[in-house]
Amino acid sequence: MTQRKRQHQPSKQTRQRNYKSYLGSPRWKEKRDIIMKKSGGKCRVCGAPATEVHHVNYQRRGKERLTDLTALCRECHQLYHAKLEEKKKREASKPRKNTRKYWRK
Ligand SMILES: [Zn+2]
Ligand SMILES: [Zn+2]
């Protein structure tokens, strides 16, 4: 049996891997530094020392503008994503009607 190579777009896993290696790149670190400096090293939400940079949106992932990023502390960052997940779940359990815009964004 021969295994045919799939000609599809990169899988979700590949994309995630690419993204991860991007987060380890000097290019990203540079951006991160700028965001940290801009925020004065403080979490935008609670003012604690910021340790992480959050993507406000992923539309320009890899070539973000500085407005796409924000500095957060670990706690707020996790909280933010937990809320986001909750929201997604809630949206997903709703009837399909208005979810399109949300998912396609
Ligand atoms: Zn915070
Ligand atoms: Zn984030």
Image (cartoon, helix red, strand yellow):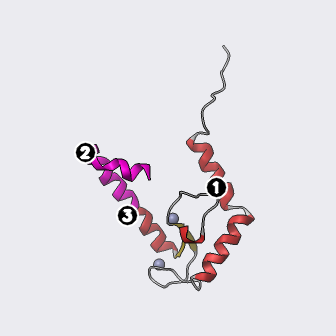
Name the main secondary structure of what is drawn in magenta.
helix
Mark 1 — residue?
Answer: 20
Please name the amino acid that badge 3 sits on.
Lys
Q: How many marks?
A: 3
Query: Residue shown at 64%/55% (left/top)?
Result: 20
Q: CA distance from mark 2 to mark 1?
A: 34 Å
Mark 2 — residue?
Answer: 95
The numbered mark, 3 or 2, whose residue comes first in the sequence reads 3
Q: Are marks 3 and 1 in contact (CB under 8 Å)?
A: no
Q: Which residues are magenta?
A: 84-105
Measuring from the top left, give residue 67's x and y in whole percent.
55, 71
Query: Residue shown at 52%/76% (left/top)?
Result: 73
Mark 3, other Cα within 10 Å: few <14 / some 14–19 / many ≥20:
few
Observer-side mark, 2 or 1, equals 2
Mark 3 — residue?
Answer: 83
**From the viewer's perspective, is residue 16 above or below residue 83?**
above
Mark 2 beta carbon near ligand 2 (under 8 Å)? no
Which one is in front, 45 or 34? 34
Query: Residue shown at 74%/65% (left/top)?
Result: 26
Q: Quadrant of the N terminus?
A: top right
The numbered mark, 2 or 1, whose residue comes first in the sequence reads 1
Which structural element holds mark 3?
helix
Which structural element holds mark 1?
helix
